[in-house]
Amino acid sequence: MSPEIDTRPQVETQTLEVNLGPQHPSTHGVFRMVATLDGETVIRLKPVMGYMHRNHEKIAEGLTYIGCFPYTDRLDYFCAMTNNLALAVAIERLAGIQVSERGEYIRVIMAELTRLVNHTAVTGFLLNDMGAFGTPLLYAFREREKILDLFEAASGSRMMCNYVRPGGVREDLPAGWVERAWEIVRAYPKFLDEFETLLTKNDIILQRTQQVGKLPQPLAVSAGITGPMLRASGVNYDIRKVDGYSVYPRVQFKVPLGTVGDVYDRYLIRILEMRESLKILEQALQALPTTSPSISPKGAAMGKAPRTFRPPKGHAYGRIEAPKGELGFFLVSDGSPQPYRYRIRPPSFINLTVLEDMCLGQKVADVIVILGSIDIVLCEVDR
Amino acid sequence: MARRLVGFHVLRGMGVTLKTFCETYPWGRAVLRVLRIPSTNGLVTIEYPEVKQQHSERFRYFPFLVYDGTPDDLRCVACKICEQECPPQCIHIVMEKDAQGRPVKVHGRTLPAQFDIDMSICMSCRICVDVCPFDAIEMDNAYELSASDRFEHMLFDKQRLLKSNEYFQQIKPTEASEVDQRLAAKQKKTAAPAQAQPASAAPSSPPAAPPGAGPAAPPTGRTPGPQPTGPPRAPQSPPPGA
Ligand code: SF4
Ligand code: SF4
């Protein structure tokens, strides 16, 4: 090179602080990331949350146990059914309520349909974040729509279901519901095949996602990550298997595991989990008992007169494998009709804690993709 | 890592989008049929204001008060259970009392003088329906309730909440007939010992529709204007203090 350039002083570089959000289309709600950039590389990233705080846990202390259910719908609005289920499981533990057989099956069917809804939608959103604007998301939403119609037929609402109750579900399935569910379960693999043709081996997706946002196994475990994110890092931990709650021990399914723990693995795990969910659904729909009522007597009485339900003094933690990870409710009862303490363990929030670790050293454009792959819903993060 | 044909899978993916595009149109489906490509009907956009989606029977949006026969015969007895249990506390009930402060009773039942639900707070949870021991409140499926004034239009008073049992039958036949059966059974039980009392309109066989009362109001209860003209039982009672 020419000697003049060598003699010039070094170019001064500065780091740049960029605010992503809170009103940013790819932060999935009101979430802010303060990223410090060196060129295009992220050297620090601070998540700022709390914009969606609704004081749910405190409000719940003034409600009856049944009164808390509609609020759980609004935690992770994609997965109202599993949110209801988690609270129901916690209340059942607290009060020792027996769940009816049919109720168990209906809940599992609803939970797995919710998993389909969530994973389909989040895959669509991930692609949206990657710049595949619209197409995969709308395909995902098209399928989601059909399942939401099923939810509406059973519970009366597409998203704010408020359906699961301690002891079973609020009301039995309407006539013809099971047939409609079968239709969807039979048609879904075809959609997944098509979706995978569109995405799984697409060169652009491979380049955008492979080796991006890696989450090493030890970090995932020590940070308490759960759900598809943990399994993408290769840890075999699925609460459906570990706790064996509800009728999950009676159905056959595998737990897909990733190897690398990058964004691509997380995408693929979700697709594979949907296929396993379909297997569970098939078995559960087959085994759905037609005789026993969907609500156990104690649960039904509780739905009719919430104030008469006074669980014994004590505390209980009920958890389930929600689509996003371990969703748990910790309840403390003082013997009154209202929970003395009501605390949620939200999977979105805890999975979000490793965001910075995954983003360091990555390009700023990847931050969006990594955030999308965590699968958060801000209403659940902030509660 | 095996070398791959770059772009091949992108093209395959585009095949999927092309197929989906074809599925959305009748001519496209014809093309797919000719080419013997298995296809389904695409999901077509519902052009909302003109075309409305068919909701399932259980679809719930906002509660209403059921009456049998005439709007006087509302089932609600102002027991205030729903007011107490409504999670966001959007129901406000005042029991009808006479000058001495004793509850007024018609057919042996107390009545609400005031029954308000704030629609802007209601979260459509259906808990009020579940807890009501008299099946007096049910969920409506009319959803076009947006209004420009929060206090004028979104605070539903008793007159606007009242809907006939026929309307309930019409929107939710299964649930309504279940409720009717339950009420009839209950009535039989209570009527058996007290024969003398004239039964007040068996719920399943409503008398001739009250003229002008408009029992089957259009589902979109948007207009707060002309109200069903019931006897003026404290319709303009001053709003409670505070
Ligand atoms: S609607 Fe039902 S619960 Fe509410 S006050 Fe009337 S009778 Fe009681
Ligand atoms: S639907 Fe829920 S929020 Fe609305 S009035 Fe009834 S109990 Fe209250």
Image (cartoon, grey):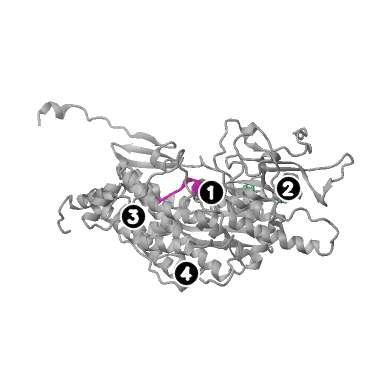
User: Whole-percent x and y of residue B174?
Assistant: 59, 58
Ligand 1 closer than 8 Å to the CB at disc 2?
Answer: no
Chain of the residue where label 2 is placed in the rendered structure: B
Chain of the residue where label 3 is placed in the rendered structure: A
CA gap, disc 1 to disc 2?
Answer: 33 Å
Identify residue type, mark 3.
Tyr
CA gap, disc 4 to disc 3?
Answer: 24 Å
- Quickly name the residue at label 3: A267
Q: Spot the residue most to the right.
A: B100
The secondary structure that most of the magenta stretch takes on is: helix
Chain of the residue where label 4 is placed in the rendered structure: A
Let me know if marks 4 and 2 both belong to one chain: no
CA gap, disc 1 to disc 3?
Answer: 25 Å
Q: Are marks 4 and 3 in contact (CB under 8 Å)?
A: no
User: Whole-percent x and y of residue B60?
Assistant: 57, 49
Along the viewing direction, whichever of B81 and A78 lies nearer the viewer: B81
- Quickly name the residue at label 4: A248
> Count of labels shown?
4
In percent of the image, x 39 and y 56: which residue is there? A229
Is residue A326 visible in this depiction of the protein?
Answer: yes
In percent of the image, x 66 and y 54: which residue is there? A64
Range of the magenta residues?
Answer: A374-381
User: Whole-percent x and y of residue A35?
Assistant: 37, 39
- Quickly name the residue at label 1: A74
Is residue A206 visible in this depiction of the protein?
Answer: no
Q: Which mark is residue A183?
A: none
> Which quadrant of the figure contains the N terminus of chain A?
top left
Let me know if marks 1 and 4 both belong to one chain: yes
Along the viewing direction, whichever of B159 and A324 lies nearer the viewer: B159
Residue B137 appears left or right of A364: right
Residue B21 appears left or right of A311: left
